[in-house]
Image (cartoon, grey):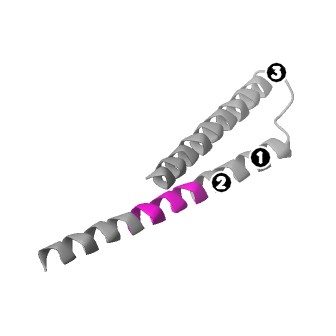
């Protein structure tokens, strides 16, 4: 269960980082469009893309582990019935 909790925490942290970076980029773009600042740099977009990829990967790892746990539960239940 510790691994499941750790993977879930990883998903939450990556989601939070992605949401924050996306909000920052949107705010910077809004400021620029309203004449209050410079346009977001390509580095901002690249960083957001890396965070999105990291979040996706964290979700895949979590889902794969849940799948393994589910298969283990089914196998145990089948053995218990036999």
Q: Nearer the viewer, residue 23 or 40?
A: 23
Do callouts 2 and 1 mark residues in contact (Cβ within 8 Å)? Answer: no
59 magenta-colored: yes
Mark 3 closeness class: few <14, some 14–19, many ≥20 residues within 10 Å = few
Which callout, 3 or 2, points to the residue nearer the camera?
2
- Residue 54 is tagged as 2
- Residue 27 is tagged as none
Do callouts 3 and 1 mark residues in contact (Cβ within 8 Å)? Answer: no
Residue annotated with mark 1: 47
Give the image location of residue 78, x and y in percent: 19, 76
Residue annotated with mark 3: 35
Vertical order, 66 against 20 (above or below): below
Q: Nearer the viewer, residue 40 or 64?
A: 64
Q: Nearer the viewer, residue 60 or 23?
A: 60
Residue farthest along the bottom direction in this orientation: 82
Secondary element at image label 3: loop
Segment colored magenta? 57-67
Q: Identify the residue at horizontal 48%, vertical 47% (top origin).
A: 5
The residues tagged by marks 2 and 1 sit, at their Cα atoms, a distance apart of: 11 Å
Give the image location of residue 19, x and y in percent: 61, 37
In the picture, measured across the screen, residue 75 lies left or right of residue 57, that is left
């Amino acid at each position: 269960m510790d691994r499941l909790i750790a993977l879930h925490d990883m998903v939450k942290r990556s989601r939070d980082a992605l949401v924050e970076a996306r909000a920052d980029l949107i705010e910077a773009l809004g400021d620029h469009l309203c004449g209050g600042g410079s346009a977001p740099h390509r580095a901002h977009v690249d960083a957001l893309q890396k965070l999105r990829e990291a979040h996706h990967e964290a979700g895949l790892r979590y889902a794969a582990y849940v799948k393994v746990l589910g298969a283990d539960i089914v196998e145990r239940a089948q053995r218990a019935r036999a």
